């Protein structure tokens, strides 16, 4: 007889997994903290960073994995293949590591046009060159028609932590300045506009891109980086809340400083979304030492990917664990974790 | 961004706040009727920037919040049928019925789909002639014309696998119910601009006169709400009770005649239940005449089963009527959160409880 310990997510709350459990908001957090973390409990997993930091023979490696299920698989500014390479490479960069090696595991649905598969693979190949990584191992499985959604990709990655660099939420302290390296929400809105069939004057392109060169430039310039995070699923608000929660610092951001392009803003207004909760794939948040924010921005703006970089706020002693935004009109409000998926309002 | 930035300008906001502060000489209690207005007040922190003498009470909010449990249960029952595709606006999917919500039904295998427009529901009906497509048509007067249009198109094209489960409600009867209640505290209304874009505000002039309460039709951006609040307190201080229009860039006194005509040709006014409030006479819309055949309650012979009475500490009904604030509820933020809610205002993106939970929880704790 097999013994199943009681599921720590009470069944009366959620007898089945909902899409929102994968949305990057509070339900995802619950899933990780109540089901996954206690099950695999160990000191490498515990910090719940973008990757694990492993000391090996005097060097420090970063190790991470991510699965890609984006629908539609081809979108303006990228495709599932590019995403699968850059996303994992960026998670390594967020550990302060130079991305080196990737695995590639494909789950393909029977009937997928071979042409589509080829496009994805060619795209991964080009993205790997761009990100400076090699795909060194992999696997492929085919599932029956109807049991997948075209193609799912999992990539795992290994990177070498830049020497002397130590990033983690435990290093965040009051006074830290928060730099955002690029404008908000382009990836999520590109996908959503496509899904909803919005016809726009100019298609919004995903910002999907490798960010490691920008991280390296900050390190080379001697910027004291305390924490890095790429605000993918759940957007900037979810990332900031996670960092505030883990570091115990309070966070204050200024609405007037948030970089949001007019196309993204426009689609958000139409669909009733908040760009703070929309996914990004080519920017990152850097917590840098007090007084170093503007210098960091200057460095980032030397790169086309970082040309919209800006200091959006800072860590503070007050309201520990809580993210507050100073609004455009001078008020204040909490920036909360998203509770489920962002659903459009009706009026 | 044009047409947005000018309504979110910090300097202009401060001027209006100063103007409100100098106009007010005594305490006033005002209600913003629409949930989007509540969210704007809290999202920009305006509620805490207003002078102490101006107390905001949050109104019935969004149509999602006031859709009766019984109708949500009907939608859930339909969604569980293998021959049905249930189509809804996204906001409705998370609102709890008596046992579960539509998102859970979707996870169980029910075919539940989200659309932005009723015409998308019609498209699904054309694409799936072998299935019955039921559109969960809810809303205030804002969505009623577009939903009426779906029925007109279905009739014209002879689409016979398209149905509507309607829970359409009308704002003026609800304001009347609030204004005439013996425990009413509201002294003036900020009326919903989008509703009035369709209906105009002639009805609101009658209400203002009858209950001797000022009403200002307001937009949804921070400066709209501040200006409308200023207009309202000026009326209150001067002892006037008129219906005024702050949202003149969108609202005309007579409303939108085409939209009103199509509503009138498709729907008839009936008594309707409001979740947390009860039945309000002549406050709902039902498909009529040749369009009645699209009514899902008839086509599927749905019974209205009264939701089982449950013991709950939830005070949603009092919140929806403006008698209590969300933070007055003992379950707020503990037993009731957007992930596991006891009442609809916590889960709807327009609900007052959700607005407090997302934007002002800290304030509530202080």
Image (cartoon, helix red, strand yellow):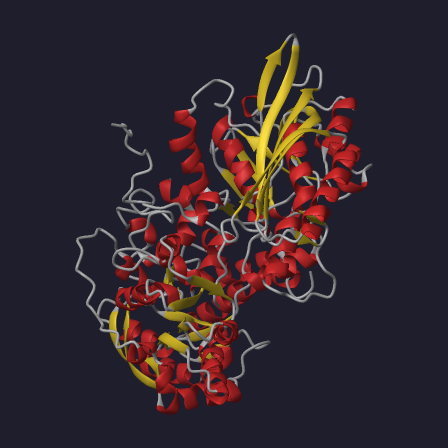
Instruction: Pick out the residue farthest to the right.
Output: A302
Q: Is residue A235 left or right of residue A130?
A: left
Q: Quadrant of the N terminus of chain A?
A: top left
Quarter occupied by residue A60:
top right
Q: Identify the residue at horizontal 72%, vertical 35% (top origin).
A: A211
Quarter occupied by residue B335:
top left
Quarter occupied by residue B343:
bottom left
Query: Residue A191 appears at what percent x and percent y?
Result: 62, 54
Query: Residue A302 appears at what percent x and percent y?
Result: 82, 36
Position of residue B104 relative to residue A7, above or below, is below
Query: Residue B214 appears at what percent x and percent y?
Result: 40, 75
Q: Is residue A330 left or right of residue B363?
A: right
Q: Identify the residue at horizontal 68%, vertical 50% (top origin).
A: A114
Residue A95 visible in this rendered orientation of the protein: yes
Of residues B57 and A109, the one drawn nearer to the viewer in this rendering: A109
Q: Is residue A156 left or right of residue B259?
A: right
Position of residue A269 relative to residue B356, above or below, is below
Query: Residue B177 appears at what percent x and percent y?
Result: 28, 74
Instruction: Pick out the residue farthest to the top.
Output: A58
Q: Identify the residue at horizontal 43%, vertical 21% (top origin).
A: A41
Q: Is residue B54 left or right of residue A153?
A: left
Residue B139 visible in this rendered orientation of the protein: no
Total marks in image: 0
């Amino acid at each position: 007889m097999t013994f199943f310990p009681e599921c720590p997510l009470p069944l009366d709350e959620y007898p089945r997994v909902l899409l929102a459990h994968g949305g990057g908001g509070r339900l995802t957090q619950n899933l990780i903290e109540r089901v996954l973390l206690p099950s695999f409990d160990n000191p490498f997993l515990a910090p719940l960073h973008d990757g694990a930091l492993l000391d090996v023979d005097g060097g420090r490696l970063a190790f991470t994995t991510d699965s890609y299920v984006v629908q539609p698989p081809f979108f303006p500014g990228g495709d599932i293949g590019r995403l699968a390479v850059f996303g994992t490479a960026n998670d390594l960069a967020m550990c302060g590591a130079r991305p080196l090696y990737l695995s590639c595991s494909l789950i393909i649905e029977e009937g997928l046009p071979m042409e589509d598969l080829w496009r994805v693979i060619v795209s991964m190949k080009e993205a790997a060159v761009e990100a400076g990584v090699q795909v060194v191992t992999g696997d492929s499985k085919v599932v029956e028609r109807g049991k997948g959604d075209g193609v799912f990709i999992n990539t795992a990655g290994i990177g070498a932590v830049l020497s002397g660099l130590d990033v983690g939420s435990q290093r965040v302290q009051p006074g830290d300045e928060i730099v955002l390296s690029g404008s908000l929400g382009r990836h999520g809105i590109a996908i959503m506009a496509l899904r909803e069939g919005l016809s726009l004057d100019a298609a919004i392109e995903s910002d999907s891109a490798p960010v490691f060169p920008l991280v390296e430039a900050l390190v080379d310039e001697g910027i004291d980086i305390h924490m890095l995070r790429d605000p993918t699923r759940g957007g900037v608000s979810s990332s900031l809340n996670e960092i505030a929660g883990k570091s115990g610092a309070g966070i204050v951001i200024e609405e007037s400083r948030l970089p949001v392009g007019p196309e993204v803003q426009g689609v958000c207004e139409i669909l009733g979304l908040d760009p703070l909760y929309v996914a990004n794939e080519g920017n990152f948040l850097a917590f840098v030492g007090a007084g170093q924010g503007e210098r960091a921005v200057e460095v980032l703006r030397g790169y086309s990917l970082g040309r919209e970089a800006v200091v959006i706020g800072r860590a503070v002693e007050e309201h520990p664990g809580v993210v507050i935004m100073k609004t455009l009109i001078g008020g204040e409000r909490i920036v909360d974790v998203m509770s489920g998926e962002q659903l459009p309002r009706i009026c | 961004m044009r047409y947005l930035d000018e309504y979110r300008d910090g300097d202009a906001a401060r001027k209006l706040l100063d103007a409100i502060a100098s106009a007010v000489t005594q305490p006033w209690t005002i209600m913003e009727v629409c949930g989007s207005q509540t969210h704007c007040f809290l999202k920009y922190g305006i509620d805490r920037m207003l002078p102490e003498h101006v107390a905001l009470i949050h109104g019935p909010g969004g149509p999602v919040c006031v859709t009766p449990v019984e109708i949500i249960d009907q939608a859930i029952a339909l969604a569980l049928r293998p021959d049905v595709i249930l189509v809804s606006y996204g906001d409705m999917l998370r609102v709890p019925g008596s046992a579960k919500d539509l998102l859970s039904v979707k996870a169980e295998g029910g075919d539940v789909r989200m659309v932005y427009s009723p015409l998308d529901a019609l498209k699904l009906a054309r694409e799936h002639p072998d299935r019955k497509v039921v559109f969960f048509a809810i809303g205030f007067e804002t969505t009623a014309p577009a939903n009426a249009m779906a029925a007109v198109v279905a009739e014209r094209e002879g689409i016979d696998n398209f149905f509507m489960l309607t829970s359409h409600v009308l704002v003026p009867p609800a304001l009347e119910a609030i204004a005439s209640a013996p425990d009413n505290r509201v002294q003036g209304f900020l009326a919903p601009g989008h509703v009035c874009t369709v209906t105009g505000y002639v009805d609101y002039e009658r209400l203002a006169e009858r209950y001797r309460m000022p009403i200002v039709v307001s937009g949804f951006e921070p400066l709209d709400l501040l200006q409308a609040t200023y207009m309202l307190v000026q009326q209150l201080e001067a002892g006037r009770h008129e219906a005024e229009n702050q949202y003149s860039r969108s609202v005309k006194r007579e409303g939108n005649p085409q939209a009103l005509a199509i509503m009138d040709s498709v729907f008839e006014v009936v008594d309707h239940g409001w979740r947390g409030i009860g039945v309000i006479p002549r406050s709902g819309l039902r498909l009529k005449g040749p369009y009645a055949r699209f009514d899902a309650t008839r086509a599927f012979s749905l019974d209205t089963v009264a939701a089982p009475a449950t013991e709950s500490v939830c005070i949603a009904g009092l919140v929806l009527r403006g008698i209590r604030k969300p933070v007055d509820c003992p379950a707020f933020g503990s037993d009731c959160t957007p992930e596991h809610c006891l009442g609809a205002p916590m889960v709807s993106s327009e609900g007052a409880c959700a607005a407090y939970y997302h934007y002002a929880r800290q304030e509530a704790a202080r």
